[in-house]
């Protein structure tokens, strides 16, 4: 192979790499957990970011911890803590976390289904 051939291959690899990078940046397939309070959407949680989110419900505080693309209810102020007993919910799962006393529930949706104003 000649030097010119290596240059062409290198240029093609750069173009393909840049195209893949741009394609991955434009993808909207991130999964989100949507938090509802009294049946109204109050937040969208990106499951790709490890963080603890805290909300004020009808009974008290309600927290969601996100870690390694999973989430669970934690530090919840309610009488029975059933929502905490659900445990960790995996990204892509259809399991919802519901805290009846706080009137808060969390369910997953794909970003393509979310109306962003």
Image: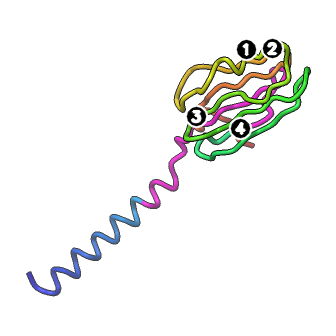
C-alpha separation, residue under disc 1 versus residue under disc 3? 18 Å
Q: Residues within 10 Å of mark 1 (few under 14, many from 20)?
A: some
Residue 82 at what x, y percent from top left?
73, 14
Identify the secondary structure beneath mark 1.
Answer: helix
Q: Position of residue 114 (x, y in %)?
A: 65, 35
Query: Dot 3: within a 10 Å radius of its alpha carbon, few (fewer than 14), some, or many (20 or more) residues?
Result: some
Q: CA distance from mark 1 to mark 2?
A: 9 Å
The residue most toward the left is: 1
Q: How many marks?
A: 4
Residue 100: image tag: 2
Q: Are marks 1 and 3 in contact (CB under 8 Å)?
A: no
Residue 39 falls within the magenta-colored stretch? yes
Which residue has dot 3 on it? 70
Q: Quadrant of residue 76?
A: top right
Tell me residue 116's x, y (percent): 71, 41
Q: Which residue is mark 1?
A: 82
Q: Residue at x 78, y 30 (%)?
A: 75
SS at badge 3: strand
Q: Which residue is mark 4?
A: 44
> Marks 4 and 3, how far apart in space?
14 Å
Q: In which image quadrant can residue 9 be found?
A: bottom left
Identify the image quadrant of the N terminus: bottom left
- Observer-side mark, 4 or 3, equals 3
């Amino acid at each position: 192979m000649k030097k010119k051939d290596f240059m062409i291959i290198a240029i093609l690899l750069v173009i393909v790499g840049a195209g893949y990078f741009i394609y991955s940046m434009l993808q909207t397939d991130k999964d989100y957990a949507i938090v509802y309070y009294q049946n109204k959407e109050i937040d969208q949680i990106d499951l790709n970011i490890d963080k603890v989110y805290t909300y004020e419900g009808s009974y008290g505080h309600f927290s969601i911890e996100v870690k390694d693309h999973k989430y669970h209810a934690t530090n919840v102020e309610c009488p029975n803590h059933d929502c905490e007993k659900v445990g960790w919910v995996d990204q892509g799962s259809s399991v919802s976390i519901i805290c009846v006393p706080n009137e808060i529930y969390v369910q997953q949706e794909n970003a393509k289904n979310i109306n962003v104003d």
